[in-house]
Image (cartoon, helix red, strand yellow):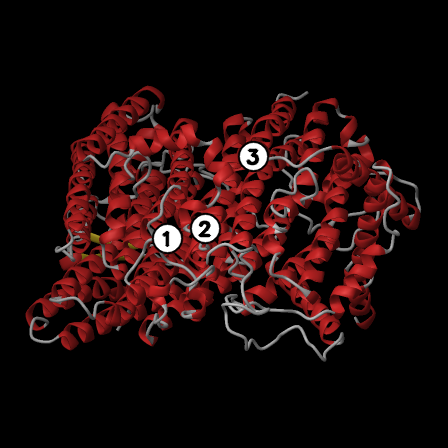
Amino acid sequence: MSYIHFPVIAVMGQFLAAFLVAIFGSKSRKASQAITLIASACAFVLVCLLIKPVALDGQIISYWMGNWEPVSGYAIGIGYEMDALGLFFAVLVSFIILMSAIYSLRYLEHDEAVDRYYTLFLMLSGSLLGLVMTGDLFNMFIMIEIMTFSAVGLTAFRNYIPEALEAAMKYLVIGSVGSSMTLAGVALLYAQTHTLNMAQVAAKIGAMQASGGLTPTVVFAFGLMFVGFGIKSFMFPFHTPVADAHPVAPTSFSMVFSTMVIKAGVYGLIRIAYIVFQVMDKSSVQILITAFGCVTMFLGVTMALAQHDFKRLLAFHSISQIGYIITALGLGTALGLTGSLFHVMNHTLFKALLFMCAGAVLHMTGSKNLDELGGLSKKMPHTTICFLIAAFSIAGIPPFNGFASKWMIYQATYEKAVESGNFFYALVTVVAVVVSVLTLASFIKVTMSVFFGQLPEKYKDAKEAPASMLIPMWITAILCLGTGVLYQLVDRTLTAPAVAASLTPANYVDKMMGSGYAASFSVKDAVATAVQHMSYWNPVLWLTLLVIVMLGVFIVILSGDNERGPVLKTKEPVADGKYATFFSGEKYRHSHMGGSDLFWGFKHDMKPYFDFIEEKHSGVLTDYTLWTIVAMAVIVVYTFVFVK
Amino acid sequence: MVQNMLMNLLHIFIFPGLLFVTVIGVLMTGIDRKLVARMQKRVGPPIVQGFYDFFKLMGKESIVPEAANKPAFLAAPIIGYVSLVVMVLFIPMFSFSVYSGTADMIVLIYLLTIPGVALIVGGTASGNPYAGVGASREMVAMIGYELPLILSVLAVCRKVGGSAMTFSLNEIVNWQAANGCALFQWALIPAALAFLLVIPGEVGTQPFDVAEAETEILEGPLIEYSGAPLAMFKLNTALKMFIMPAMFVALFLGGVHTGNVVLDVVLFILLTGLVSFITMTVPHAIAARFKVERLFKFYWTLVAALGLVSLVLVWFGL
């Protein structure tokens, strides 16, 4: 069978499996789990098989549903089109779906009616895959709707928790506003170009750009779709539903939510801005997107510092990291887009891992309160190591993957600043570095208050998570390190082709509408120049050095006084003796440092700011909706005034 | 091939790697202590006291507390030490540099955070609440000095790169060899001041030693450490005492040509010692410890403003 059918089979397989679970799943838990596992594994394999033809050989797969090919240059059927950009996201989606499916086997063991969970879960994964593969604007909107509504349903899956219903309600309202914006944008585009096929729309807009600029309708459509996908990616000020949704949603869904559902918005932004509208060479659009990204990353991380719920904290970090991604993709340079896409992948890996660790802690102890937990590293060593790897990755400590992508983002923003002479981008670089340090601080806080410190009495019997949860954790953890060290390999196979695909809309148009079509509408060949390769960061070299030096140090230490040795067995009881913790006479029970007790100096100095943002995050849905509407108005006015 | 490998090993283990930087760092702590003592009209320890301390600690028993996470507790000091040694290999000493073209400022700044993170992780892994307080303060200090540090580095990079972008320390040194020290560009003087003020914060010497603060929180993160791991942490501080001034010399006083590599290196070390004296010894002798919130405010207002002024000046071509 030819590989051109693979994308459609992957998408349809997920939807089919969803119906199968709905039919057979109510009888037995095993059946729904088996169907989900098989479907997600198949999708993963199918997508991975496409890496060779699409990413490495640079082909673009086009597929007309029901063989409705374009008639006299007009696309009338629904077309699927898979280029390297779509493939990049599809690989991530199917990987995370598979990991989440494995993780959920034991994680949902205390929940009733898991068939409903798996039905929605498969609908979600099918819609995500469909979203990144479709070549049709209206089909894209439908996929977004399926995605949003399955996500809302999954958020409220544990519907005996009142907060879950509240969170789902918030997500539903804000998400619907976003969907309506997208729909309105699609409708306007249809009115303007008389087609819904993205390739053809891109060609028509390309012609428009070549002959005297975009019409106001198209600009308006861009503003609306930017807001729509901005809401789907939860950038500031649309970020509010995320924070409420994560703490109550099942963790196996949280990890998909914070990695891939959010990235669906990012994918949409890249697709419309770079390919459909081809506006990324306009400095007004660059500043708009970068500014929103920059605010998002700073606000997200500072809100995260104020949290003491494990999963809510991670939710705010998702927002902050999305800020990095949006900032970098808004630069409109090849390096920026590379950094952005690489960060998309890294964030997917480490955030999934963080959520899995949080879920493991929650599952085994029943708590996600950072002020209560403590000292779990003795009880859950695997979870601790995985968490540390993920925390170092998100904080960007070399040689983990977060470092490589953040470093590209600093480089890209500063390069942009120097090239354009705009001081704004230099400040963006500074903010990005500071946010990185704050991220580190925030994860130190979690490490300290959950895994290290004193073990509270009530968690004396906590156990390590079961194997079906540890396996996906370890796979992702190894990938976090692997993609950091071998980032050049990853760049060659996934990100560089995706960047090249985003920067050459003409290829995308030609493949779908027949070659020469793009040229006849004068679609720009490349929006930005080719990727520059990093010369200064060579992780393999650094790592080799690190290992050699570390060997040297170990030799020095081992050749020293070995009789008493550096590592000792502990025999004496905790309460007294030399292996006890030194409390200086204080009572043991006062000794644990809870999450809220940390970083006093920083919080003290920044108190006005923290008070302000915490007051603004009132939790009232009408406030949040108001923010959304106001931001939409601002963005639309901005696009009208500045985007020509 | 073999010769090349031997040269690499020589660089890594003898000069300017492991052995050299350790010896020079420990000597600098000795000189620092002696000078502080003299300024305070004390006799002070001998200059090689650092070595005595090191060997004494290596011979002592290493206790891992019951509540500690043993792997993290023991690995932390070694990882911090190793990343510092690796950093030294990438700092060009005037005309002498081991791995040219690989010294990226951003990478160096990030590597520089690893010892701090190691101290925090090691301290928190010990399970002691005092260590927790210390680690928390270390983190606040880190947030504090990172902002001015990045501002002043960006200013230098902009000045050197002109209309092209560079983060390469080698290029910065070469530029200074052609155009004179960056310190003498008047627009960069605020950045240099900011960097000078960052140095003691990064190393954690008085008056910026909020994290260890013996008199308040009993050496904070180090409270449960003893024996060899404690010796390694002391070495980390000693290494930082060399590396931070060395970075300053490379960034702001680079580009001296004497034509002789040995002379260059000696001059580099002397300048480093001078910077270390100005930034660490003198404040240590005359100032009392900051409160932690004052420290943070100091860095994010005065020092960050200095860095920002420099960046703006350089940006608009001054």
Q: Secondary structure at mark 1?
A: loop
> In this orientation, does residue B8 appear?
no
Labelled disc at residue B296: 3
* Kind of residue at disc 3: Phe
Quadrant (top left/top right/bottom left/bottom right) for the N terminus of chain A: bottom left
Measured Cα–Cα span from mark 3 to mark 2: 18 Å
Are the residues under marks 3 and 2 on the same chain? Answer: no
Labelled disc at residue A198: none
Give the percent coordinates (x, y) of residue A21: 12, 69
* Kind of residue at disc 1: Leu
* Kind of residue at disc 2: Lys
Asked if marks 1 and 3 touch (Cβ < 8 Å), the reply is no
Labelled disc at residue A370: 1
Asked if marks 2 and 1 touch (Cβ < 8 Å), the reply is yes
In the figure, residue B19 lies in which quadrant? bottom right
Left or right side of A143 for B255 = right
- Disc 2: which residue: A445
In the figure, residue A48 lies in which quadrant? bottom left
Label 3 marks a residue whose chain is B
Q: Earlier in the sequence, mark 2 or mark 1?
A: 1
- What is the crowding at mark 1: few (fewer than 14 residues within 10 Å), some, or many (at least 20)? many
Give the percent coordinates (x, y) of residue A121: 19, 61
The answer to whether A450 is drawn above or below residue B163 in the figure is below
Measured Cα–Cα span from mark 1 to mark 3: 24 Å
Q: Residue furthest bottom?
A: A563
Measured Cα–Cα span from mark 2 to mark 1: 9 Å
Quadrant (top left/top right/bottom left/bottom right) for the C terminus of chain A: top left
